């Protein structure tokens, strides 16, 4: 099979996609893509704060995907994800990630993202502080949602997400944060 790479390149250019990855996310791959992202941001002459925010969002999203698959006991192939980093017409960076999750988890996560998207900056700050004070259960493997709240706090517009149902009882969850 021969893929029309020129058309793909044109699509990426039109949508201002800087970096795109699709496949299993291993720890070393997350690190390598992160290094490439840092270098790309440097070439773009991004401000240090923009670079840190974009890199932080990328790390938060990809590590969440990896940790989720590990908790589920899924193989690397099941831990597959799609990650896209693009610039919008206003020069802001959009970090997007998507992966397969259980439908129930997807519904819960979608509701959480929608709740956060409805909050203003002061409410997000209060939610973050409230979450910090909550005791974590013994053996908890999660950061209690702090990462997601922090993404919403740093974003320049409300978080956005989608959930597409699959036939096997799972769903594909996508999230976008604009910095």
Image: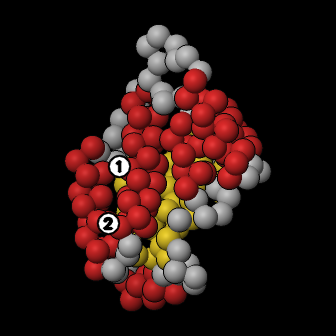
How far across and down, in percent of the image, does residue 62 sit? 41, 48
Mark 2 lies on residue: 37
How far across and down, in percent of the image, does residue 20 sit? 40, 68
What's the distance in space between the residues labelled 1 and 2, CA to CA? 18 Å
Residue most toward the right?
A: 118
Identify which residue, 12 or 7, lies in the foreground.
12
Residue sitting at 43 percent across and 13 percent down?
Answer: 139
Quadrant of the snapshot with the N terminus: bottom left
Identify which residue, 79 or 122, lies in the foreground.
122
- Which mark sits nearer the N-terminus, 1 or 2? 1
Residue sitting at 47 percent across and 10 percent down?
Answer: 138
- Circles 1, 2 touching at the beta carbon (< 8 Å): no
Labels 1, 2: front one: 2
Quick one: SS at disc 1? strand
Quick one: SS at disc 2? helix
Residue 96 left/right relative to 105: left
Residue 131 left/right relative to 29: right
Residue 108 marker: none
Mark 1 lies on residue: 24
Local crowd at mark 2 within 10 Å, few (<14), some, or many (≥20)? Answer: some
């Amino acid at each position: 099979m021969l893929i029309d790479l020129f058309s793909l390149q044109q699509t990426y250019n039109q949508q201002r996609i800087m970096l795109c990855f699709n496949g299993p996310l291993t720890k070393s791959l997350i690190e390598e893509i992160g290094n490439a992202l840092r270098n790309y941001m440097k070439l773009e002459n991004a401000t240090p704060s923009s670079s840190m925010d974009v890199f932080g969002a990328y790390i938060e999203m990809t590590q969440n995907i990896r940790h989720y698959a590990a908790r589920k006991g899924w193989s690397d192939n099941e831990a597959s994800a799609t990650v896209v980093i693009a610039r919008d017409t206003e020069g802001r960076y959009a970090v997007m990630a998507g992966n397969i999750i259980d439908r129930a988890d997807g519904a819960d996560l979608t509701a959480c993202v929608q709740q956060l998207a409805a909050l203003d900056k002061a409410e997000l700050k209060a939610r973050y502080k409230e979450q910090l004070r909550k005791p974590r259960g013994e053996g908890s493997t999660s950061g209690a949602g702090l990462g997601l709240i922090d993404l919403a706090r740093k974003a320049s517009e409300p978080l956005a997400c989608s959930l597409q149902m699959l036939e096997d009882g799972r769903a594909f969850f996508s999230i976008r944060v604009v910095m």
